[in-house]
Image (spheres, rainbow, N blue to C red):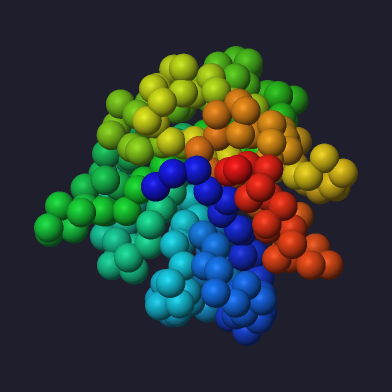
Amino acid sequence: MGKDVIVACDFKSAEETFAFLDRFCDRKPFVKIGMELFYAEGPAIVRAIKARGHKVFLDLKLHDIPHTVKQAMAVLSRLDVDIVNLHAAGTGAMMRAAIEGLTRDDGTRPLLIAVTQLTSTDQRAMEDDLMIHAPIDEVVMHYALTAKNAGLDGVVCSPREAGAVHACCGERFLTVTPGVRFSNGDVGDQRRVMTPMEARRIGSDYIVVGRPITAAPDPVAAYERCVREFVS
């Protein structure tokens, strides 16, 4: 897989999701299914979107004891998603267990990536709420390196950190970056953000874009603009 725009389908129901995807006609954007939609509709929504020909990033951010995560990943591996994720803060042991669970009998598995720090988290929140007092960039690099050493394929990070992650972990280690907004857009609850063009320049492999596309007056035009600025 090369550079691509992943559309965050953070809708409340299958009906809303399909109405949105139907606007794209023959185009099949890479989509993210997060907790809101997955908890509302269950595994069936994943199967239905895959059946329509879309690639799927299943964004459930697993974080539990290694055995529980291993068992959960074994279930998710049967959904034929393209990318799945977990929290790097769950430790290297949890991440290694996740790979074991995710790997099918034939040796194949979806890409597995780890969330470093959420893009809604800034230095002050990390220190005050999480009692992590190292600089946020150092924390992200440490989590990324831990994920790589555990055998993962990449991380979720801010686009501001993508270049440094590649420098630390190698160019083939994927950076999947939310927190992307158009230059004239509202940043919402995000703190560490960039435009699609800036994310491309700094080295993001995939950008995850939600409201700037899904809430746009013309979502297809917004998606195409995002692709032009990031991929072209």
Task: State whether residue 95 is above or below residue 215.
Answer: above
Which is nearer the eye, 143 or 182? Answer: 182
**Residue ranking furthest to the front:** 232
- Is residue 179 visible in the rendered image? The answer is no
Q: Position of residue 208 (x, y in %)?
A: 60, 49
Residue 29 shown left or right of residue 196 in the figure: left
Task: State whether residue 219 is above or below residue 179.
Answer: below
Task: State whether residue 197 is above or below residue 28.
Answer: above
Which is nearer the eye, 174 or 39? Answer: 174
Residue in view at x 62 percent, y 72 percent: 24
Q: Position of residue 129 (x, y in %)?
A: 68, 32
Q: Count the marks: how many?
A: 0
Q: Position of residue 184 (x, y in %)?
A: 87, 44
Residue 191 shown left or right of residue 116 in the figure: right
Residue in view at x 52 percent, y 78 percent: 41
Residue in view at x 74 percent, y 58 percent: 222
Q: Considering the image in quadrants, where does the C terminus appear? A: top right
Q: Position of residue 188 (x, y in %)?
A: 81, 48
Which is nearer the eye, 160 or 232? Answer: 232
What is the quadrant of residue 136 in the picture? Answer: top right
- Is residue 200 visible in the rendered image? The answer is yes
What is the quadrant of residue 99 in the picture? Answer: top left
Residue in view at x 68 percent, y 57 percent: 224
Residue 60 shown left or right of residue 218 in the figure: left
**Residue ranking furthest to the left:** 106
